[in-house]
Amino acid sequence: LHYYSLRIDNPFDLIHFRSVCSWWRSCSLQTFRPIPSLRCPLPPDAGGCGDDCHILRSRVYLVTSLSHDPPRFWLFKLQEEENGALALQSLLNRRTSSEWGVSYPSLLIDLLNSQVVELVQEHVACYTYWCDLFDGPAGSYKCEQPIGFMRLDGENKEFMALGRLSFQGLGMYRSFEDRWTEIETTSGPFPDGITWFNGQFYVIDTVGVTKVVKPTLEVSLFRRSRPCNKTRKRWFVKAEDKLLLMCTRNLEEYRRPHLLEEKGWFEVSELNEERNDWIQMEDVGGRVLFLDDHFSLSCLPNQVPGFKPNSIIFKGVLGYYGHQVFEFGEQGFILLGDIPEYTQLFPSPSWIVSNV
């Protein structure tokens, strides 16, 4: 049983698996099987920093309370810390209870009367870098950067990661080589989105160039045949067997809140792998999308009842605008707080039992 448990990656599935043994039921998840973060040391920089680089993984879950009629739902996110501990995170940003003076309660979920489903994972590379400022003191700083991540084995020990991090361009880490390889040695536009899809990494930069990076380090480029010149922000979204590209104008261009309601827009395209092109779509195929700086999530409406089909929930680029909602077929953005049926999923609902 212990051997099989090592191949169960989801902590909630592991809890169910352990329930067959009374001794396992009496052990905490962390002490039973600590899972420290994956290491991917960077080449030391001018200040000797970078060798602490590691990958933090967060997972978004949907919990359904089966003891209510009709069933109730809640979306939440757990981050696996560097030491293997689990920390509750805010859904649409990377804040945990130990950061920024924010306090998120510990929670108890009745798994006998609830169903917990993992919806998506996000991966970021965390490392220390040295900064020598012209007008200030030099020093070391902590940094988090989104990466493309691919697991190569069932136990999550062998993997590949792609990102810019401290390099001039893109670099790839392959665990079986235990080192980073610089794919690009000249500086260029920063990545706006990066993901793994159908055996390849996809990166799109701030000027709209899509780079396809194979595990062999081979790189190819293409541009969208019908570019959107107004685009200032992009996301990749995996939707079942499709890869979507979401584009919008940077919210910094909407200097007044009323312009969000009047002019806010999104555009969606689907990847055509044979043609190496992004094909524009009218909407997101009835899905509900969640967009953040480091992750994206696609759900079907029956997975998250209460959310309208063809809608996007996203974190505003300007923090003081809060969470926004865009519905295809409607004009402009709406504050999430102005839609009562949406706010019940943010933050934790009253039927989740606090452990404080």
Image (cartoon, rainbow, N blue to C red):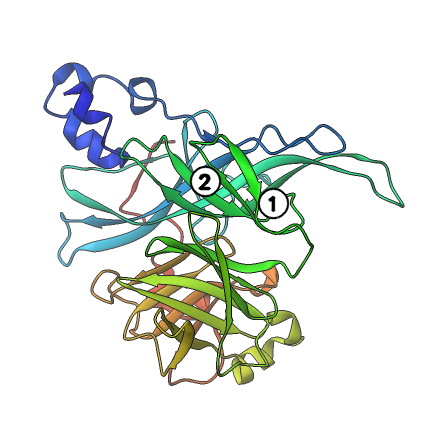
Type of residue at label 2? Tyr
Type of residue at label 1? Leu
Q: Nearer the viewer, residue 53 or 226?
A: 226
3 left or right, relative to 242: left
How far across and how far down the image is residue 251, in percent? 60, 71
Q: Is residue 285 above or below residue 142?
A: below
Q: Is residue 218 above or below residue 239?
A: above
Asked if residue 236 shows in the view, the reply is yes
How far across and how far down the image is residue 322, in percent? 53, 62
Label 2 or label 1, whichever comes before in sequence order:
2
Which residue in the rendered view is the most extreme toward the left? 20
Where residue 104 is drawn, which disc sits there? 2
Which residue in the rendered view is the most extreme toward the top? 23
Q: Which residue is mark 1?
A: 165
Q: Quadrant of the N terminus?
A: top left
Residue shown at 25%/65% (left/top)? Answer: 300
Q: Quadrant of the C terminus?
A: top left
Question: What crowding class fits label 1: few (fewer than 14 Cα within 10 Å), some (14-19), or many (20 or more)?
Answer: many
Where residue 34 is drawn, which disc sits there? none
- Secondary element under disc 2, as helix, strand or loop, is loop
